[in-house]
């Protein structure tokens, strides 16, 4: 019997709008940075994996994660490393991703999460975002719909490490078979959850939340 649903955040019920590369382009243009949005987006994902998944060593903290983002920014924008406004540009980008306007809510998610709440299912977020996610969820009016938020930089372990999933299970005293993990990443969301015995729903593009309801009921 399903008692809880665990959600990844970006790519699952939130998505960047406009694209990640175009967000960087718009934010950095006033500083005089001339970037290719697609190339920057690709480099960001590559350097994120290198820094956060290979170079950082748990347990993590908020300060460590911000410094890691500074390292990613430095590598992706290395052509502008000596620019006199480089640090201000980083702080501008970093702050923007704590604001609700950096993302939009996936179509159908509000009514879906509201139905889950009314039906008494446990709802939690398990994410590799950082503490900036709280203000984003609050700004979109979503924070009240979740019973708990498990952030890798606060828990100390990023997905796909099993510790962050176990933290959520233990918090609610749940067995893995009582949970559906919903996420867009096979590596970070789906496979580790399956290995622990959870049911899963793999988001590909825009999710069909009616399909998830069929799994729940």
Image (cartoon, rainbow, N blue to C red):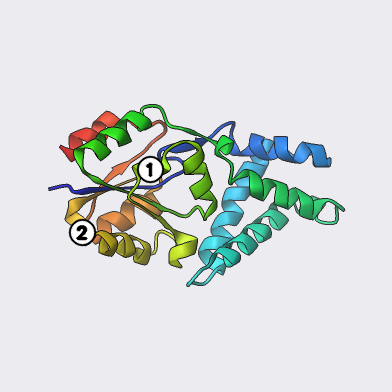
Examine the rendered structure and indicate whether residue 216 appears above or below residue 210.
below
Foreground mark, 1 or 2, reads: 1
Write the residue at 58% across / 35% down.
Answer: 101
The residue at which mark 2 appears reads as 174
Q: Residues at badges 1 and 2 in contact (C-beta under 8 Å)?
A: no
Q: Percent x, y for residue 98? A: 58, 46
The location of residue 113, given as percent across then percent down, is: 31, 36
| SS assignment at label 2 | loop
Question: Is residue 157 something that shows in the picture?
Answer: no
Q: CA distance from mark 1 to mark 2?
A: 21 Å
Q: Residue at x 56, y 32 (%)?
A: 17
Which residue is situated farthest in the left direction here?
A: 1
- Answer left or right for 99 relative to 172: right
Specify whether 215 is left or right of 14.
left
Q: Position of residue 104 (x, y in %)?
A: 50, 32
Provide the residue designation for mark 1.
144
Please, what secondary structure does the residue beneath circle 1 have?
A: helix
Q: Locate residue 64: give its quadrant.
A: bottom right
The correct choice, above or below, for 67 with respect to 31 in the image is: below
Q: Quadrant of residue 203?
A: top left
The C terminus sits in image quarter: top left
């Amino acid at each position: 019997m399903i008692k809880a649903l665990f959600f990844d955040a970006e790519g699952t019920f939130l998505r960047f709008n406009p694209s990640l590369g175009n967000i960087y382009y718009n934010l950095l243009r006033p500083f005089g940075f001339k970037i290719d949005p697609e190339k920057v987006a690709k480099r960001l994902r590559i350097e994120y994996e290198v820094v956060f998944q290979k170079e950082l060593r748990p347990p993590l903290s908020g300060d460590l994660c911000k410094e890691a983002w500074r390292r990613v920014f430095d590598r992706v924008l290395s052509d502008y490393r000596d620019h006199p406004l480089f640090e201000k540009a980083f702080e501008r980008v970093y702050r923007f991703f704590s604001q609700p306007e950096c993302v939009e809510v996936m179509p159908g998610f509000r009514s879906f999460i509201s139905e889950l709440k009314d039906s008494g299912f446990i709802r939690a977020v398990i994410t590799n975002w950082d503490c900036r996610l709280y203000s984003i969820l609050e700004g979109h009016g979503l924070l009240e719909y979740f019973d708990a938020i498990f952030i890798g930089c606060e828990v100390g372990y990023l997905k796909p490490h099993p510790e962050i999933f176990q933290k959520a299970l233990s918090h609610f005293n749940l067995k893995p078979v009582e949970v559906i993990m919903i996420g867009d990443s096979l590596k970070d969301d789906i496979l580790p959850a399956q290995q622990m015995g959870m049911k899963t729903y793999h988001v590909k593009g825009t999710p069909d939340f009616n399909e998830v309801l069929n799994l729940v009921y």
